[in-house]
Every structure is written in C-alpha cells, then in structure tokens.
Amino acid sequence: MGRPVAFITGARRGIGKAISVSLAKKGFDLYLSDKVIDDDARQTREIVQSLGARVEFKELDISDLSCHGPAFEDACRRFGKVDCLVNNAGIGAPSRGDMLEVSEENFDQLIAVNLKGAFFLTQQAGRYFSKFPKQDHPRSIVNVSSISAISASITRAEYCISKSAIPMSTKLFALRLAEYDVAVFEVRPGIIRTDMTQGVTALYDELIAQGISPIKRWGEPEDVGRVVAGLASGDFEFSTGSVFYADGGMHIQRL
C-alpha cells in the first residue's frame, strides 16, 4: 500500500507548518505550497523530510487562479495522486480599524485569498477526484477557517466576511463530492499563537485571562495540526460537512 499524499497551501510557517508536521507523522507525503519560498519554507521542508515524508515545496499564490490547474497537475505527476487537499493559506486584515473606512483594495485582497482562492482550488481538487476513483487511502478536503467565521469583530470586518463563507463552501462541496468518496471538513481555530496574532499579543493575553475561552491559554499551531491530521487520515469520514473547533471552547455560548 502506498503512502497517502496531501496538498497543503500556506505551509511555510505557523498553522500550515504544524499541519505539515502532523501529517508527516501520520505517514503522508506532502506537496507543500506558499506564496514565497524562504528560510521558513526550507526549514519546514527539512523537518517533514526528517520524519520520513517525501516532499515538494512549490511557490503558489492561490489568488492567481491560473496557477491552480498546473499546481494540481504537478502534484499528481510527482506523487502519482492526491488524497487530501488542505486549504490553509490565508491573510489577515492589513490593519485594524473602523469598518466604515475599509478600502475596496483591502476587501478585494482578502476575498481573493481567503475565499475565492480556496473555493477554486477546491473546485480543481473536486474535478480531479471526480475523474479518478479512490485508491488505497481515504480522500478529503479540509478547509481551515477561523473563529471569525462566526464571531464578529468590527475592527476586522473584511477578514470576518472573507472567512464567513467558508462554512457554506464546506457544506456545498461535501454534498457535491460525497458520490466520489470525498469527505469535506472545516477546521475552525480560535486564538492561535502565530505571526498573524503576534502584533496583538497583549490584547489576546487580556481576553484569555478574562475567560474568552473556557480553556485559558493560547492555542498553538500544533492544536490545529492534530485536528487536521485526524480528519485527513479518514478517522471521521462519516462526519463530512462538519465543523471541528480548535479554540479551547471559545465557540460555546454561555450565560
């Protein structure tokens, strides 16, 4: 039986890096991508290789839809197949501020990466899965969204909007791809310690201390990586279309 293959976007650091490591530990070979290949990307590649994974790391801007087809074809050519797509690549709001002042440029950029790019790369994966039957491993698509998909933050309106459509996209693709034995999931992280949250550490330290989540600590990228690895491994394929939280219970409504 061959090793399963995962295609991961936004893999060079943070949550993407942790997902890559978790999948390597599960026995996956990895086709990793990010907008740039730098020292962070090279370090991630070295780590997953040390865990026994075959790995390719390619430059990919998911907001450029013309790159999606060639990238997927390249992954299949190098590894012979793709069993799992992890839509992890994403960007935060360029700055926090009054939503009455959000620019069209910033809005379009967030939609292009966080929503449009993920949707059309998933479409590319779906077309591939529809043409080729499942081989020897479960097949899945995992969308990494954010607690901001359901929690409104008026200082990051464009970011919240870009993430809020991921839940519906997950459900739609789960329905469309079920006939091809492809499970589709959403993983919804909470407050995770990454470069994206580094600039607001003091704010989140205070919110965590005040009990914004029942588990009073920062989430780590590895908390998300382990969830994704479990989903990609086929442990929850009957739960297609579901949301899996990695937020310390932040989503739980309380009185």
Image (cartoon, helix red, strand yellow):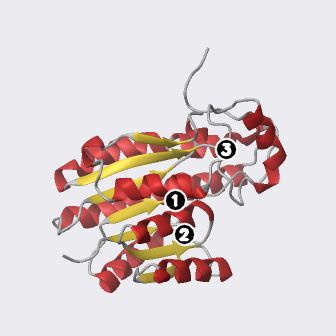
In the displayed structure, does residue 187 sit left or right of residue 237? right
- Report crowding for label 1: few under 14, some 14 to 19, many 20 or more residues within 10 A (C-alpha): many
Q: In the image, residue 187 lies at what x, y percent?
A: 47, 47
Q: Which of 169 and 3 is in front in this view?
A: 3
Q: Which mark is residue 11?
A: 2
Q: In the image, residue 189 lies at what x, y percent?
A: 56, 46
Q: Name the residue under label 3.
A: 158
Q: Which of 39 and 104 is in front in this view?
A: 39
* Pair 1/3: label in front: 1
Q: Name the residue under label 1.
A: 88
Q: Eyeballing the image, is 91 above or below 162? A: below
Q: Eyeballing the image, is 228 above or below 157? A: below
Instruction: Using the rendered image of the protein, determine whether residue 10 is visible from the camera's viewpoint.
Output: no
Q: Which of marks 1 and 3 is nearer the N terminus?
A: 1
Secondary structure found at label 1? loop
Secondary structure found at label 2? loop
Q: Which amino acid does label 2 sit on?
A: Ala
What residue is drawn where x is 49% and y is 77%? 48
